Amino acid sequence: MTAESVDEPTAEPLESRQRRFHPAWTVALVALIALIGAAGFRAAPGVLMVPLEEEFGWSTAELSLAVSINLLLYGLIAPFAAALMQRFGIRAVTVVALFVIGAGAALSVFVATPGQLILTWGVLIGLGTGSMALVFAATITDTWFATRRGLVSGVLTAGSATGQLIFLPVIAVAAEDIGWRGASLIIAGGALAVMPLVWIFLRNRPSDLGVARYGEAAPTVAATPVPRGTAWGAAKLALTTLREAARTKTFWALAIGFAICGATTNGLIGTHFIPSAHDHGMATTTAAGLLAVVGIFDIVGTVFSGWLTDRVNPRILLAAYYALRGVSLLFLPSLLSAEVQPSIIVFIVIYGLDWVATVPPTIALCREVFGDKGPLVFGWVFAAHQIGAGIASVLAGVVRDHTGQYTFAWFAAAGLCAVAALVSATIRRHAAPAPAPVRE
């Protein structure tokens, strides 16, 4: 009886305490703040393109090229960043990424040629933000949570929208009041300010604190130090994972759908909505405010999508999201005008709810099919997202330069969404077996 009176109270409070608080929530909160701090540049191109064009006389296509390189690197670096996080730890990679973002934004104030803009906007910030991309959210979710994964991935994904919500109006006002250089320095400050918080509070894995993942009764592995290796070893792991994943039809279905997702969000609306609204006589700050509203409803839509992903077939969710987005894009050319009409508000709300609602079900499908390699595979799927975004960014700029408007770009995007909805709906329920572990 004495032993029972000692053992039983020990197990019960631990279980009860996990229900009340778990360090995974602290890690998730710090990750959310880091994503917010890294999101400044995601909001910047649409606001800063017009001031740069007016000051230097660069064409929309030249400016779009810098954004396109940024978007491509933002995606292509993601799977390698996921592998680096496995090799060197989440904290170290995140701190370096935030520093690169801040450096790129700060150095952009000295640009005088399109090539220099490509180096700062495109290469440096692309590498930094790519390491802080949605694959970061997937890695945090899978490393620290055994349950509530859909909800957590939805909240972390919404961090980028929150960053847009915070930075976009500030950048727009700063660009008008103190110039685009001052706005760039604000972005740099936002990224650098988060670095100490990440270094102090972000932990690489539950075993570092001697706990299990949230939702697990006990740690599945003993506490171990962060794996050590080389950058080449991380790159090899990422490439091997791609080769194995590319043998499955599910991977290509997810990649095609996510490429279209990127084309219709970061590539088109995120980059060209403000210039397109400006073409119709709308003030830049007004258009930026509308995109900030997208950020508000993106938070709601993404968190709700994460909640749904824990309960509804993710294939159905993806098909519905892409279909709704395509329908809304069909109406956009007729909604833009100099004044903010109720119809454009309806579009903004719908597009905001749908903006990255696709992320939680896509992460869930990667986990379902590829198991522990889900975050790495999602990194490659996200790379497809940014390839689509980069291509769309350039092509929309070319369309604008040759036709004087974006109408054809919006209609083409609507058609692509129909393709994404069809592809997502036909993803097979019986997933391919997870690839065998890579021997190191």
Image (spheres, rainbow, N blue to C red):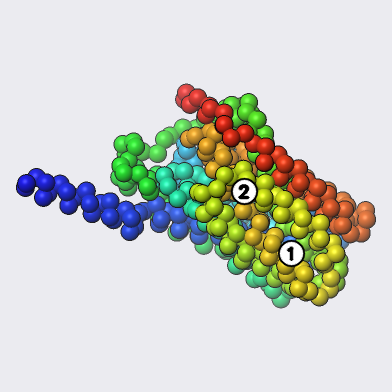
Instruction: Estimate the x, y position of residue 236 in percent, counting from the top left.
Output: 56, 29
Near mark 1 (Cα within 10 A), the count class, few <14, some 14-19 or many ≥20, is some
Instruction: Estimate the x, y position of residue 35 in percent, counting from the top left.
Output: 55, 56
Is residue 182 shown above or below 437?
below
Near mark 2 (Cα within 10 A), the count class, few <14, some 14-19 or many ≥20, is many
Give the left or right position of residue 431, taking residue 149 as reference: right
Instruction: Estimate the x, y position of residue 219 in percent, counting from the top left.
Output: 32, 40
The residue wearing badge 2 is: 317
Report the front residue among 426 and 157: 426
Q: Residue at x 28, y 51 (%)?
A: 15
- Residue 231 visible? The answer is no
Give the mark nearest the N terminus, 1 or 2.
2
Report the front residue among 106 and 415: 415
> The residue under label 1 is which amino acid type?
Phe
- Residue 401 visible? The answer is yes
Q: How many marks?
A: 2
Q: Residue at x 11, y 50 (%)?
A: 5
The residue wearing badge 1 is: 347
Task: Report helix, strand or loop for mark 1.
Answer: helix
Task: Report helix, strand or loop for mark 2.
Answer: helix
Residue lying furthest right: 403
Q: Residue at x 67, y 51 (%)?
A: 321
Mark 1 vs mark 2, foreground winner is 2
Q: Residue at x 81, y 75 (%)?
A: 339
Give the left or right position of residue 337, taking residue 184 as reference: right
Report the front residue among 335 and 271: 335
Q: Which mark is residue 238?
A: none
Q: On the image, which quarter does residue 73 sit in?
A: top right
> The residue under label 2 is which amino acid type?
Leu
Q: CA distance from mark 1 to mark 2?
A: 20 Å
Report the front residue among 222 and 348: 348
Q: On the image, which quarter does residue 181 sit in?
A: bottom right
